[in-house]
Image (cartoon, rainbow, N blue to C red):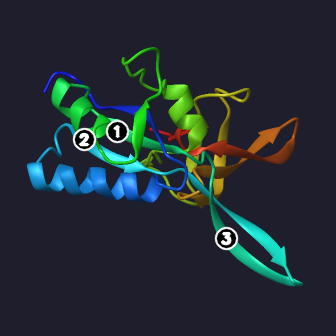
């Protein structure tokens, strides 16, 4: 398939987000449309609510009334999503859905990019991006899930710890 799947925003009746998401997933399953409609997400955040002096972790929708769908836009995929019960339409001018940009997707935190690194704690790495580009340091701590690495760099005769994203460092050859 030459087209790549992009994220689209679907508007739903308020409170129908979960139902719409599961209905779309069911139709995808039943009609084998996995190559057209890849993923359905409802952006949520975990917040702490204090009610009657009790703390509770609650999952709250970041955008009530909206569902994100990663799909290849074709007449079929548009029709399936548009005619799902509870969907009022796509976000975009008229009936033409507009995909989210890479920046918007990254900002929403919808997709977690997995970064594979070729270095580990104790290795010497070269910083390949950011203000310290070109510096060489030693990896002190790594957090794959959090997408960061702490590197100790020698600056002005002192060891200085810096926190970088995992893809801002590479192993020394």
10 Å crowding of disc 1: few (<14), some (14-19), many (20+):
some
Classify the position of the N terminus by image quarter.
top left
Using residue 19 as the reference point, say whether residue 72 is left or right of it: left
Task: Decide if residue 168 is in sight here.
Answer: no
Element under disc 2: strand
Most foreground residue, 76 or 151: 76
Q: Which mark is residue 70?
A: 1
SS class, disc 1: strand
Q: Are marks 1 and 2 in contact (CB under 8 Å)?
A: yes
Q: Nearer the viewer, residue 169 or 66?
A: 66
Residue 54: percent from the left, percent from the top?
83, 85
Label 1 with label 3: CB-CB less than 8 Å: no
For residue 12, above or below residue 99: below
Q: Residue furthest left?
A: 31
Instruction: Name the residue located 73 percent from the left edge and 26 percent from the top edge.
Output: 131
Label 3 residue SS = strand
The residue under label 3 is 58
First in sequence, mark 1 or 2: give its number: 2
User: At which x and y percent is residue 173?
Assistant: 44, 38
Q: Residues within 10 Å of mark 2 (few under 14, many from 20)?
A: many
Q: Quarter-wise, where is residue 107 in the image?
A: top right
Relative height, residue 106 to residue 112 (above, below): above
Q: Which residue is denoted by mark 2 in the rendering?
A: 37
Q: Earlier in the sequence, mark 1 or mark 3?
A: 3
């Amino acid at each position: 398939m030459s087209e790549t799947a992009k994220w689209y925003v679907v508007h739903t009746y308020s409170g129908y987000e979960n139902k719409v998401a599961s209905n779309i997933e069911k139709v995808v399953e039943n009609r084998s449309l996995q190559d057209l409609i890849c993923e359905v997400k409802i952006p949520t955040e975990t917040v702490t609510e204090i009610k009657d002096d009790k703390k509770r972790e609650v999952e709250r929708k970041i955008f009530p009334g909206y569902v994100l769908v990663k799909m290849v836009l074709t007449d079929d995929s548009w029709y399936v999503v548009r005619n799902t019960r509870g969907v009022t339409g796509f976000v975009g001018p008229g009936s033409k859905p507009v995909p989210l940009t890479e920046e918007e997707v990254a900002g929403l935190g919808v997709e977690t990019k997995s970064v594979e690194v070729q270095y580990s704690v104790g290795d010497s790495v070269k910083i390949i991006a950011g203000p310290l580009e070109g510096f060489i340091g030693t990896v002190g701590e790594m957090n794959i899930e959090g997408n960061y690495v702490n590197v100790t760099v020698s600056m002005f005769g002192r060891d200085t710890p810096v926190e970088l994203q995992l893809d801002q460092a590479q192993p020394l050859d």
